[in-house]
Amino acid sequence: MQLVITIINTTVSILTLFVFIYSLLSFILGPYHPMRLAMGRVIEPMLVPIRKVIPAVGGLDFSPLILMILLQVIGSILVAILRSLS
C-alpha cells in the first residue's frame, strides 16, 4: 500500500511542477515553441474544463492555480483513503 501512496504523491508533485513550469513558460516562450507545445499536450487537457467553468478575469487566467490546488486536494484525498484502508 505504501508503494501506491508514494506513486500518487510523486505523480501529483510532478504534475504540479509541470503546471507551474508551463505557466512560467507562457510568459517567456512563444505559443508555438516546441517545449510549450510538448508540455501543452499534457497540461492543456486538464486546464480546458477549468477554463470553461472559470473564465479569465481581467486578462488573468487562474486555471493553472486552480489546477494545482485541485491536484493537491485530490492527491491528499486519495492518500487519506488508502491509509484508512490499511
Image: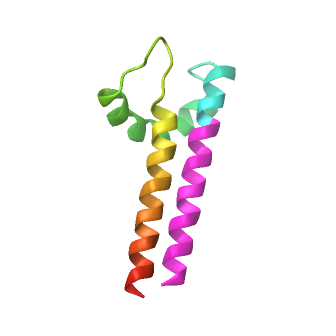
Q: Is residue 4 left or right of residue 26?
A: left
From this viewpoint, is residue 42 visible? no
Q: Residue at x 36, y 34 (%)?
A: 50
Instruction: From the top left corner, tell me how far across and down residue 67 is, in percent.
Output: 46, 41
Determine the image quadrant of residue 39: top right
Most common secondary structure along the magenta stretch: helix
Answer with left or right where residue 86 lies relative to residue 36. left
Residue range highlighted in magenta: 1-21
Residue drawn 41% across the image and 67% down it: 78
- Residue 26 vs residue 1, the one in the foreground: 1
45 over 83 or under it: above or below: above
Q: Is residue 69 left or right of residue 22?
A: left
The residue drawn where x is 48% and y is 40% is: 43
Rendering coords of residue 4 (x, y %): 49, 77
In reply to whether residue 10 is colored magenta, the answer given is: yes
Q: Please provide percent x and percent y for residue 36.
A: 59, 31
Q: Quadrant of residue 80?
A: bottom left
Rendered view: 59 above or below 83: above
Q: Position of residue 19 (x, y in %)?
A: 56, 40
